[in-house]
Image: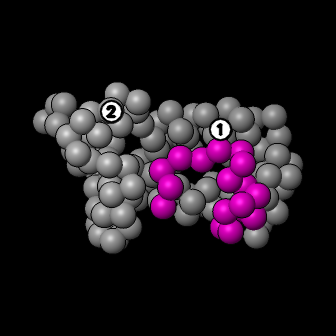
Amino acid sequence: MKEIRQELRKNDFEEDKVRQAHKLSGHEAMADIISLIKNADSQQNPLLTAEERVNRTLTEIMAAHSFNEEQKEWLAYIKEHLIVNLAIEKENFDVMPVLERHGGLARAKKIFGPDLDTIIAEINYKLVA
């Protein structure tokens, strides 16, 4: 990511201007930057919207684990957050409304137990893989 930022700056793509353009263009139909970069690198990688990338990631996560119903509900809340942000950190649970209103980090820790950190890391890894 550091190299990408440097390359963007070198070509007059200042981060604040990229963020402003992203904000103005809307999030629903826009392919995320990860897909664009991967597609530029290899024409075999399809361009995915943020929602498509998140859906694919969570489908893979759910297939790899046995989640109970309460955990699946929380994964749906996490999905809402990811579609807009494309990453999740433990700090987000107490500041992002979609997560905070359902009990925040304390509730997520209770629901996922010691696996929470692993699930977060796996989600973030798969989103950029």
87 left or right, relative to 108: left
Q: Magenta segment range?
A: 84-100
Q: In the current view of this chain or complex, which residue is farthest to the top? A: 3
| Magenta stretch: includes residue 48 | no
Number of numbered markers? 2
Name the front one of labels 2 and 1: 2
Is disc 1 placed on a helix, strand or loop?
helix
- Left or right, residue 26 beside residue 64: left
Q: Position of residue 127 (x, y in %)?
A: 45, 41
At x 75%, y 64%, the residue is 100
**In terms of sequence position, does the residue under pointer 2 or pointer 1 come before the other?**
2
Residue 49 visible in rendering: no
Q: Residue at x 71, y 45 (%)?
A: 90
- Quadrant assignment, res 79: bottom right
- Say what amino acid the circle numbered 1 marks: Ile
Q: Which corner quadrant holds the C terminus?
A: top left
Left or right: where 124 falls relative to 96: left
Q: Residue at x 68, y 53 (%)?
A: 92
Residue underneath mark 1: 119
Q: Main secondary structure of the magenta part?
A: helix
Instruction: Please tell me the numbered disc located at residue 6.
Output: 2
Residue 95 colored in magenta in the image:
yes
Q: Tell me the distance, in whole angstroms, between the alpha carbons under discs 2 and 1.
A: 30 Å
**Residue sitting at 47 percent across and 36 percent down?**
126
Q: In the rendered view, would you say 118 is above or below 33?
A: above
User: In what element is the residue under mark 2?
Assistant: helix
Q: Amino acid at mark 2?
A: Gln
